[in-house]
Image (spheres, grey):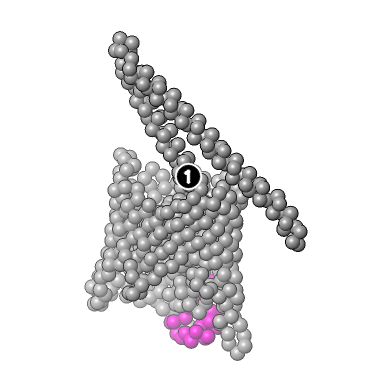
Amino acid sequence: MSKILALLLIFIIPLTVFGADEKERKLQERIQELELRIKSMEETLAVQTDEPDTARASGENQEAQIQELRRQLLVLAGEVEKLRSGEQETEITPEQASSMGLGPSASKVYRRKQGVSIAGYGEMLYENFSGSDQSDAPVDRASQLDFLRAILYTGYRFNDRFVFNSELEFEHASTGKGGEVSVEFAYLEFLANKHLNVRGGLLLVPMGLTNEYHEPVAFLGARRSETESRIIPTTWREGGFGILGSAGLFSYRAYMINGMNASGFTADGIRGGRQKGAKAKAEDFAFVGRLDINPAPGMMFGGSFYIGGSGQGQIMESGRNFKVRTTIGELHGQVQVRGLDVRGLYARAGIGNAADLNRVLELEGTESVGDVLQGGYLQIGYNVLSQYTDAIRLTPYYQFEKINTQSSVPAGYAKDPAKDRKIHTAGLEFRPITNIVVKGEYQWHRNEAGTGINQVNINMGYNF
């Protein structure tokens, strides 16, 4: 074995050194080429500027040529500076970023040729609640202003093949008042080609419209949807590895990750089952796969599926170990064309051995974990300034959502009618520039128990 390793090193080290020298040589050749072009342009510009008026038959045309040369000169000078500093970037379309499961800022490291990248986003939310519920019963719920999160993306492009990318989250402004600092994702990726890449580490689970694309400028609404908080528990990340890529109109992601922890499941959903990469129990693993089709720019349709055990060796009774098989399926679609923004999603989750889980967790009556959870929403918005300018956006929007985290419960347990909910949201989004957004909305909350509370939400967000 040691001889094989030695032979590999004999071949690999010279190739690596040669590759680095070759890259440096090509870089220097490119810089010299650009400098020669700049020098030639400077000489041409000087000659044309010094010509007497009598030699310029068409003064306006000559001036236009000089201005064009000056513009090219600035472009080339900037390119030389980038080459020298190693800060070259390449463009990535929104569709390419989406196929990698990343938002606009999260994909910044892929725009670099090599080196460090820094990006981020943040958002603050104000919530004001009605003084009575839908049955006109008085409610005393205080308004709240919360700096929800401040995010820092840090990445490093090692070379053409290897990338590190991460998201660090600071939640609720202070760890002294319920806030926390978390790693949202951190992974290494091998870029074989656009059809097949390999990714491993702490990964965003590729489900729904928001879990991977959760930057505030990437979706309409001051708050994330209930369906994508309780059934697809955004932001959801787990440790694992997998493959991703695209081919033609299609893109895919398929990961093996640690399973959820069913001891955190409740009647409100499976959000508490996320392990977030923090000493995650890995007795049970899960598979998650996603397939999207992008028939045209701004259009995306697809679905994803998750299946795995959630017992993690914790749900036991009389020596029996219940796996608590968990399945989640969802279908989604999004169209963003000519100022129109239409999105829709339906999600359904099934919890196996829910009755046994209830017994072990000592849940009774309407506290039951649902053995079926389902929900979905349809949203439409239109940028009323889209026909006049691309610099500013003003988008009224409406969303209807229906969710029930106890769509079905095991025999012997009862449904809580408050879990069967409908939410109407009417709002307005204003983006003075691409990277800043302010959203204001009113939500009508209704449930079968008659205890829904309406609320006003105002959100300010940014990304860079």
Q: Which image quadrant: the N terminus?
A: bottom right
> Is residue 410 shown above or below 236?
below
- Of residue 186 and residue 353, the one placed in the foreground of this image is 186
Q: Is residue 93 above or below residue 329?
A: above
Name which residue lies at 35% across and 59% down.
122
Horizontal and vertical percent for residue 61? 34, 18
Residue 13 point in image, percent of width and height: 66, 50
Crowd band around label 1 with a 10 angstrom C-alpha radius: few (<14), some (14–19), many (20+): some
- Specify whether residue 240 is in view: yes
Magenta-span inclusion, residue 364: yes
Name the spot of residue 181 as percent of width and height, x first: 41, 68
Identify the magenta region. 350-372
4, above or below 275, in the image: above
Residue 195 appears in the rendering: no
Q: Nearer the viewer, residue 153 or 370?
A: 153
Which residue shows up at 59% across the image and 60% down it?
A: 242
Q: Which residue is mark 1?
A: 86
Look at label 1 and name its amino acid. Answer: Gly
Q: Quadrant of residue 366?
A: bottom left
- In the image, residue 306 lies in the stretch drawn in magenta: no
Count the marks: how many? 1
